[in-house]
Amino acid sequence: IYTLSLHDALPISIHRHHRVAALLLTILPLAALLAGCESAGTSRIVHVAERPRWTAGDSWTYRGKGREGAYTITRQVLREGVFEGQDAYEVQAGDSRYWYTKQLGYLARVTGDRTVRRAMPPEDWQWPLQVGKSWSATVTWVDGAEQDRRFVLTGVWAVEAYEEVKTPAGTFQAFKVSRREIESGASQEFWYSPAVKGWVKLRGADTAVGAYEEELTAFS
């Protein structure tokens, strides 16, 4: 390590001047190199969420507000099973049962013994999650409750942020994931937290059920 004071740089003689100049020419590139190495060595933490594994009994309770006012809903995993040949999770929510793929993609909604909505192919989440990641999926939605009406919609997904989210169930670090339908303009936002293996907050606008917002109040 070289240290030069102001007095070191004063020209005592031509010879001394050349020696100092030569020394400076040696030091300055070295200092620049070290600064560059320090800058290049700066590390950045990259947060990644791997695909969760749900098990029977996992549950999440939300406080929500939608077109018809305030509500509370609990989504509980009933079991791992097979839906139309695909490994999936069966989840109870209100009076309906929902099937999700192991990638947490929506498969179907079942009421009683009737499938009232189906997604073909399912709109899978793309794991692992990482800020900056994006994907799209074109899905045919079949509404069995209305004489098999079909809608083809393309959803564009993006992992926008990794941020702190405060809910009645606690404060969590979560990945903010957005989904936008090209054809309808509907949009949804999900805050997924690895700590709860699910969403701690959800928000939708211009969806089939109107605008809504939900936040986690309990989980197990």
Image (spheres, grey):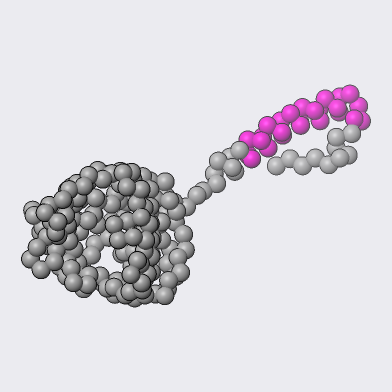
Report which quarter residue 59 is drawn in.
bottom left
Image quadrant occupied by the C terminus: bottom left
Q: Residue at x 33, y 70 (%)?
A: 68
Q: Is residue 17 magenta?
A: yes
Report which quarter residue 47 is drawn in.
bottom left
User: Main SS type for the magenta part?
Assistant: helix
Left or right, 198 with respect to 83, comes to right
Can you see residue 192?
Answer: no
Q: Is residue 143 magenta?
A: no
In the rendered image, residue 53, in percent from the top left (x then y), is placed at 24, 62
Would you place residue 213 above or below residue 105 in this image?
below
What segment is highlighted magenta in the picture? Answer: 11-35
Front-most of residues 92 and 21: 92
Front-most of residues 140 and 189: 140
Q: Residue at x 7, y 66 (%)?
A: 113
In the rendered image, residue 82, in percent from the top left (x then y), is placed at 10, 59
Would you place residue 166 above or below residue 116 in this image?
below
Q: Residue at x 66, y 35 (%)?
A: 32
